[in-house]
Amino acid sequence: MFDKLSNDTTWSTSEEKLYFQGNFLTAQGEAVTFQVIKFSKTKGAVLVLNPQSLNMGEELSIAKNQKVYLKFSDNTIITLASSTDDDGNAKYSLVAQDVAQSSSASGYYDLSDADIEKFKSKTLTFLRIETSTGNFDCDIKAKNAAMLKKAIGLIVNAK
């Protein structure tokens, strides 16, 4: 997308699933989606992580400088700090006389060239996002890690 005011071009991927864990019987679940963004006037890229919960009794938010820990297949860990605040989005509704509660927040994490190289050469296996309600821990499936790796490669090479 080209911004006529700033003369900056923004490339971004669609929002994709990185993690999902749900229980049909209890109607509870957790998920994380991701998006990768690159701006033509800046170096590197931005990883947007969106943790979500359903009927878990929590209202998620991510404060500026809260961390995300990304563990790779070789046991190395990248630690990134959120560059923005997100007070989150909690919703409550009534479904067949039962209260349904959902919550989500987004963290924007700047990726350095070294971080990008790590994503391109290794496989993400575990993710921990610091939120207002504590750590949001996720075991990442290989197919979802591959989708993230592909998205980073596409955005980094966008011209």
Image (cartoon, rainbow, N blue to C red):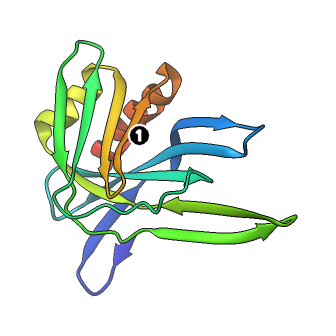
Residue at 32%, 84% in the rendered image: 4
Q: Tell me if mark 1 has few (under 14), some (14-19) or many (20+) residues whose alpha carbon lies within 10 angstroms of its own.
A: many
Q: Position of residue 148 (x, y in %)?
A: 41, 35
Amino acid, disc 1 = Ala
Q: Is residue 129 left or right of residue 110?
A: right
Q: Position of residue 36 (x, y in %)?
A: 36, 50
Give whichever of 154, 136 is nearer the camera.
136
Query: Where, by quadrant of the figure, is residue 72 drawn?
Result: top left
Residue at 63%, 62% in the rendered image: 101
Give whichever of 110, 54 is nearer the camera.
54
Q: Is residue 158 left or right of residue 103?
A: left
Q: Position of residue 102 (x, y in %)?
A: 59, 61
Above or below, 74 relative to 123: above
Observer able to see residue 14: no
Residue at 88%, 64% in the rendered image: 96
Q: Which residue is mark 1?
A: 151
Helix, strand or loop under label 1? helix
Single out the residue that lies furthest toward the bottom.
5
Q: Is residue 79 left or right of residue 72?
A: left
